Structures are given as C-alpha cells and as structure tokens.
Image (cartoon, coloured by chain):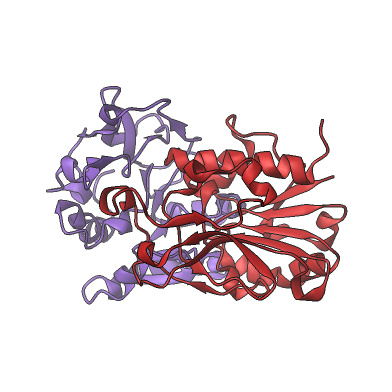
Amino acid sequence: MTLAVLDGGTYYHQEAIYGERLGGRFDRTIYAPELTAADLAGCDALMVADRIHPGVLRGKRPILLDYLVGGGTLIVLGENSAQQWAPGVSWEFRPTNFWWWLEQGGDPGHRIVAPDHELFRHVGMKELVWHYHGLLTPPPGATSLVDITPDGDPQGKGGSILYDHCHVGGGAGRMIVTTLDPFYHHGSFFMPAASRFLGKLLDWTDEAFRTPG
Amino acid sequence: MIDAILLDCEQSETGAQALITDLALGPRIDLVPFYDLERTVLSRTRALLLGLHSDQRYLASRRGQLEAFLGGGGTIVVCGHIGHPFLAELSPFQPIHGYRVDDLVVNREADHPVWAGVDPADLSKRRGVAGFYGRGSNPPPPGARIINSLGPSRCPVDFDCRPAVGGRLLVHAGADLWGYFGSGNSSERIMPQLFDWIAKPSEAA
C-alpha cells in the first residue's frame, strides 16, 4: 500500500511534507512540475496538496486521468482550481471569511452529512470548522461528507466542502475533493484547526492507503 | 521600462488583481505567468515581485537568471517563508515556536521608505486578531537592514540588503505585501511606496 503526495515546490509544501510536525506521512513525494505516469506506478492514492499552481495541474491532466482510469484514488485539496482539470468537479467561489467565529455566533454552517464514512473515524467537527475556499456541487454518484448550510453560506445557497466520488465516470477511480487548504495554513504555522485537520486526514490515509509499519 | 513584474501563481484573493487594475499603480506592473519566468526578459523591469505561493524549487532552478537581474541593478522583492533558499542571501524560515499574541506585535526597527507613515499597530492585528503579518523570520544575512521585527524577541520579519551579486533585495517573512493594497488603514501606503522605492534604485538598501 502506497500513498504519494504532489509537492508544488512552495515553502508550505516543504514544511508540511518534510517538517518535524507531520514528517514521514507519505511513501512517495513527487514534485508536481516533474510528474510522470511512471511516478504513479503502484500508488494506491495520490494526495494533490492544496495550492499547487493550477497551470501545472492542467498540464498534468492526461496523467491524472489515466491514473484514475487505472483505479487510482486522487485526494484533491483546496485552491487547486480542480474545476479546470478534474472530472466532475463543480466549484463556486466564496470570499474567504477569516472572521466566522466573530460573526456567525460560532456556527458557520458546517455539517457532517455522512457520519458513517470511514474518514470520520479520524476527522471530527473540531478539525473541520474553519474558513473554506468556495463550495462544491458533488456530481451524480458522489457523496457529500461535509456540507455548509444555506444559513452559513453568504449567498444563502449552501453546498459541499468535502465529498467522496467512487467509480468516477463509471470506472474504478475514486476522488476525494475538498475546498479546505491545510498544507498552506499548517505549513505557514497559522491556524491550529488547519493543522489538526491535516494531521487527522493523514491518520485516515495511513489507515486506508498505507501498509502499517 | 516598467517598475515591476509580478509572477502570477493563479491564486485568488492575493491582492494582485486589484493592483493590476488600479488606475494609478496598474500601469506600473506586469503580471507574468509564473513559469514564464525563464522566457521573460527581465531587463525591461526594475523589480521582480515574488509572492508567498511561489514554487521556490523552480526559482532555485532559475538562480542564474535572478542573479543576472540583480547584477544588472534590479530589485527583487520576496514575500513568504523561505523553504528552498533560491538566492545566497536567503535562509530557511525559522518560526517563533509556541508564539503568543505578544510575540507577534510588529516593532519598527528602522525607517524605510516603503513603510513610511505605516502604523505598526495596523500591521500587528486585523480586526483584533494577531499573526497575519508574520510568525517568524527568514534570517537576514550579515549587514542587512532590519526594518520590522516581531515581539519582545525582536524577531526580524522584514529586511533589505545589497546582495553580493548586485542590486537590491527586500524580504518580508509573511503574506504578500500587495495584500495590503486598499486595506483602508495606514498599511495601504505600502504598495505605492514600494513602487516609488523601486523606481529609485539609488535608494540605499
């Protein structure tokens, strides 16, 4: 079992992937601009760290699609403009609200809507409730895991910030997609909730996609 | 000759969009796709602005081009933490471990044209919340001018220096300075003053 991560070459990718706080959580690190199909051979899952330059990901789209068709799992984190290159992704911008905890009476609208999902053996509300970058509309066949209620959405519409899409396009591939960007905030030594989320997310990927050491 | 090229990392809410459409400052800056750096003739600009979302591994691979630009008298402005030192004067970021609010208060260490009239209190907190400006240091090289520091430990958060290869280097160990453009308080002076500083390369570093 092998988990790989795409590294966008920023300081926060460096800190999150190699830093002392969360080091050693990936079996393979691939510098995104140099990604080749061979790099993904034998990978059970590929985490696309948040905030990789979208132009790089658009350029690697054929490799990522082939990986999905071959039964791979993509875990796509936020601010990657996934709607420009990843199948089925529909995303709408929402302005970042760093102040939700001052403005919304402590309820910015997050709801776990599929509590039996395996991810929630590790991730809970205290890892999920922080600012997010836009809302997703899960495509047919996908399951939203975390919604924002219409009351929590400044546009009153609501949507998903994390979904799981098995059998993408009727094939064997799987995509987990979120609008949270924990590599950036954890790697910037800012926002403890983002660090908690990344740590628990990696506890789940340890369980789901890596061979216990 | 324009004042600045900003390498575009295609990230939202960085302030870059507001900057390039601004009636006064917009004509002074070009937004260039990040990985087009290697195809960009830098002699047509006075400064290169590198934001916190930069792929620093790529910048390290372009070190020769960056050094040639500095050697020709250019100015490089770096925002963010250093993860991959891509110039001789840059060292890996050192966070203030276990910081508390008092550790993040901005202190003015030296007068600098870019920060003239900017109240450090407007940098220390946004809506009462500390930490947006900086949480540690890109350790300055010997001889650098420390401009702003953080907390009682006076951890350097901004410095400028004259790189050995020539030119000028200004480093901010925090979010992009162009994010303060149009902030509605004294910090919005930073960007117009940065452009004016860039346009006067004889200004001592």
Q: Quadrant of residue A132 in the image?
A: bottom left
Q: In the orientation shown, which residue stands out farthest toward the left?
A: B117
Which chain corresponds to the colour red?
A
Q: Position of residue B175 (x, y in %)?
A: 37, 49
* Residue B110 falls left or right of residue A20: left
Q: Position of residue A5 (x, y in %)?
A: 70, 50
Quadrant of the frame with the N terminus of chain A: top right
In the depicted view, which residue is nearer to us: B90 or A193? Answer: A193
Q: Residue at x 71, y 45 (%)?
A: A205
Q: Residue at x 26, y 23 (%)?
A: B152
Q: Position of residue B187 (x, y in %)?
A: 20, 52
Q: Residue at x 75, y 49 (%)?
A: A4
Answer yes or no: is residue A208 visible.
yes
* Residue B43 falls left or right of residue A3: left
Q: Position of residue A117 (x, y in %)?
A: 67, 52
Quadrant of the frame with the C terminus of chain A: top right
Give the colour of chain B. Answer: purple
* Residue A96 falls left or right of residue B24: right
Q: In the orientation shown, which residue stands out farthest toward the top?
A: B153
Q: Residue at x 48, y 41 (%)?
A: A126
